[in-house]
Amino acid sequence: MTSTKEVAEMIFKNPPVEPGSCSLLVDEINTDDVQYTFELILTIYMEGIMILYNNLEGIDLTMIKEEHLMKPDKWFESLGIKIMVYNVADEDYYCKVALKADPKYKIMFAIKNINKEYHFLFNSKYWQDGNYAFPIKQLDKMRCLFVNGTDSYSIGFRRL
C-alpha cells in the first residue's frame, strides 16, 4: 500500500502535468466519506508543501502568504483539484494546521512524540460525546485553518 507521503513524492518531485490528466477522486463522493477525503487531500497538500519548501527549514513562518500556500496548485490541477486559499480573520473550519517550526507548538510535538513537520488539530466545538461531528458534508465547503503568526488563511479544495 502506498502512503500519502509516497503519493505526494510521486506528484511533487515531478513537474506538473496537464490539468485533470491524473485522477485522485472518484466521480461521486459519499457524504459519509467527505471528511476522510478532505483529510486525504489535505495530507497530500501538506506533504507537497513540505517537499516544495524543504520541510519549512529556515523559513520565517510569518512570511508565508497566500502565494506560498497556492504553490502546489499546478500539481493539484493535474489531479483535477483546485486549491482555494483565502486570507481570513476567522472561519468555521474543520481543522487547523500546527507546524513543528511554530514555537507555540514545539512542546506539543515533543510531548506527543509527533515525527511529522505538521499536525492537524480538529475544531474543538464539534467534539460531541467522544465523536467529531462536523456538519458540512460537501468537499468544496470544508476548510482548514492555517495561521502564520500574523495572518489566518482558509485552505480548501474543489474539483476542476
Image (tube, rainbow, N blue to C red):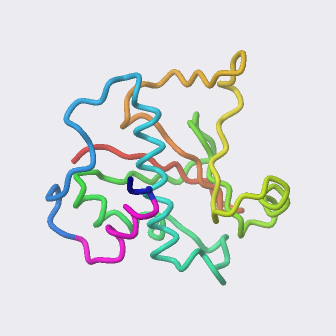
Q: Which x, y percent locates residue 151?
A: 64, 59
Residue 110 falls left or right of residue 8: right
Q: Is residue 79 above or below residue 34?
A: below
Q: Which x, y percent locates residue 118?
A: 63, 60
Where is residue 158, by image quadrant? Answer: top left
Q: Is residue 120 above or below residue 140?
A: below
Q: Which x, y percent locates residue 5?
A: 46, 62
Q: Is residue 47 above or below residue 160?
A: below
Please state the total of marks drawn on the protein image: 0
Q: Which x, y percent locates residue 85?
A: 44, 54
Most distant residue in the top direction: 129
Q: Indicate yes or no whether the magenta region holds residue 10.
A: yes
Q: Is residue 34 above or below residue 69?
A: above
Most distant residue in the front direction: 1
Q: Decide whether the magenta segment is chiefly helix, strand or loop.
A: helix
Which residue is at a point 14% across and 59% down the rendered structure image? 21
Q: Indicate yes or no whether the magenta region holds residue 44.
A: no
Where is residue 94, by image quadrant? Answer: top right
Which residue is at a point 26% across and 43% down the rendered structure image? 25
Where is residue 78, by image quadrant? Answer: bottom left
Span colored in magenta = 5-16
Residue 50 falls left or right of residue 150: left
Residue 97 falls left or right of residue 14: right
Which residue is at a point 37% across and 61% down the rendered structure image? 7
